[in-house]
Image (cartoon, helix red, strand yellow):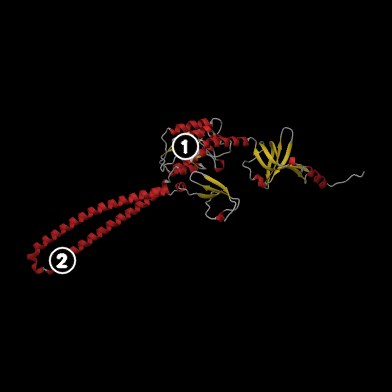
Amino acid sequence: MKKITRTVSEVNALIRNLFEDQSLKNIAIIGELSEFKTSGGHAYFAIKDPNSTLKGVMWKNYLMALNFVPKVGDEVIIRGSINVYSERGTYQIYAEGMSLSGVGDKLLALKHLKDRLESKGYFRLEHKKPLKRFNEQIGLITALKSAAYEDLIFNIKRRMPLSKISFFPAQVQGKEAPAQLVSVLKRADKMNLDVIILSRGGGSLDDLEAFNDEAVVTAIYELNTPVVTAIGHEINLSLSDLVSDVHVSTPTAAAEIVTLDQIVLTKMLDEYSWFFEGRVSASFRHLKEHFESLNGKLLLSHQQMTRSRKGFIDKASMVLDQILEKKLTTYQYQMTTYGQKLETALGYHLKHKREQLKTLSHRLIDLSPENVLKRGYSLTLRADGAIIRDVNQIEIEDKIITKLHNHSIISIVKKKE
């Protein structure tokens, strides 16, 4: 029988056909990453167990969809299909998804806890306490000497130097973190503070585990003091963020929401003060000029009368002196009375303008971005934080963020009109 001679490509094609078995399609494999590198945006890796190793590749579009950065030593679950790489005559898994082993169980447990707390009303808007406009006594809860701590202290003092900060250090990660957080939250609530900021610098699901602890969430819910959280970015929203009265993405945003910018407010008050001082000075100048004009006319009239009645000086001088003295007395009395009335009117006018300034100050506060959002408006941002004012600023499949007064909604653009 004559043997058939085949090319390498033909042999690899035959082997490829063997991998068309449906049991090798859309398969899930668990193992440890023993190799992982990227090139041209694609990932090339090897996954192993105690007895075997399997090579694999993940194309760029799938790699960019991962919510974590894989590294050697991670135990992962990979979804994909087994096939032949003909150019090298090897088989490998073409990965379409990858997740850390065990993360799915944690997410499921977290969802069950969230649903249970939500059914108790922990996240309802009617339980949210409003923030004061002027927060003089501010409590900070975060890790000592952390980046979040430095950020909060710097921005609060920059915006409102006269504010008084009470710091309550606590672990924000690890087994002891939940108990410490509950303890300092309850202690801070007894300090008669205007607001409490609970913060850390973001992190993975494991990093934020303490802020998803039921005891911590319950403690925040039961506080009498308003709580602002700045724990994770929008993609890492914790249960503590959901139960707090206001949550923001960063420590800087937390500092800004509880303080008024004193530099801007002082400048505005100075400008109004200069304006009113100018108006008062102008009024006094006008009165002085009017008085000098009246006095000049009076003197001129006296001189004219003296010249026209020169022949009757001896006879009429006494009468004229009496008339002039009486008129001068009358004018002096009128000027004194007018000055008193003017002073009273100016005092009332200045008081009225100060009240208007106070009203304008409150209106400025009411028109702050946060208060505008509280009245039902929203602000739409691109993923890089830029405000979207025109539809041409975004493209299909772009991520956009709609910011409400106490929540944000993340959306993907599917259509533009």
Q: Is residue 168 above or below residue 284?
A: above
10 Å neighbourhood of mark 2: few (<14), some, or many (≥20)?
A: few
Q: Position of residue 239 (x, y in %)?
A: 53, 37
Residue at the spot of label 2: 303
Amino acid identity at mark 2: Gln
Q: CA distance from mark 2 to mark 1?
A: 81 Å
- Which element type, helix, strand or loop, lies under badge 1? strand
Question: Is residue 107 found left or right of 251 in the rendered image?
Answer: right
For the point 47% across and 37% down, the residue is 140
Q: Position of residue 152 (x, y in %)?
A: 48, 40
- Which element type, helix, strand or loop, lies under badge 2? helix
For the point 30% across and 55% down, the residue is 281
Quarter of the image that includes the C terminus: bottom right
CB contact under 8 Å: marks 2 and 1: no
Q: Is residue 6 above or below residue 215?
A: below
Quick one: 264 or 381, which is closer to the camera?
381
Amino acid identity at mark 1: Leu
Residue at the spot of label 1: 140
Question: Is residue 338 found left or right of 213 in the rendered image?
Answer: left
- Locate residue 90: give its quadrant: top right
Quarter of the image that includes the N terminus: top right
Earlier residue among tags 2 and 1: 1
Quick one: 24 or 392, which is closer to the camera?
24
Q: Position of residue 374 (x, y in %)?
A: 46, 46
Question: Is residue 31 found left or right of 347 in the rendered image?
Answer: right
Q: Position of residue 245 (x, y in %)?
A: 47, 40
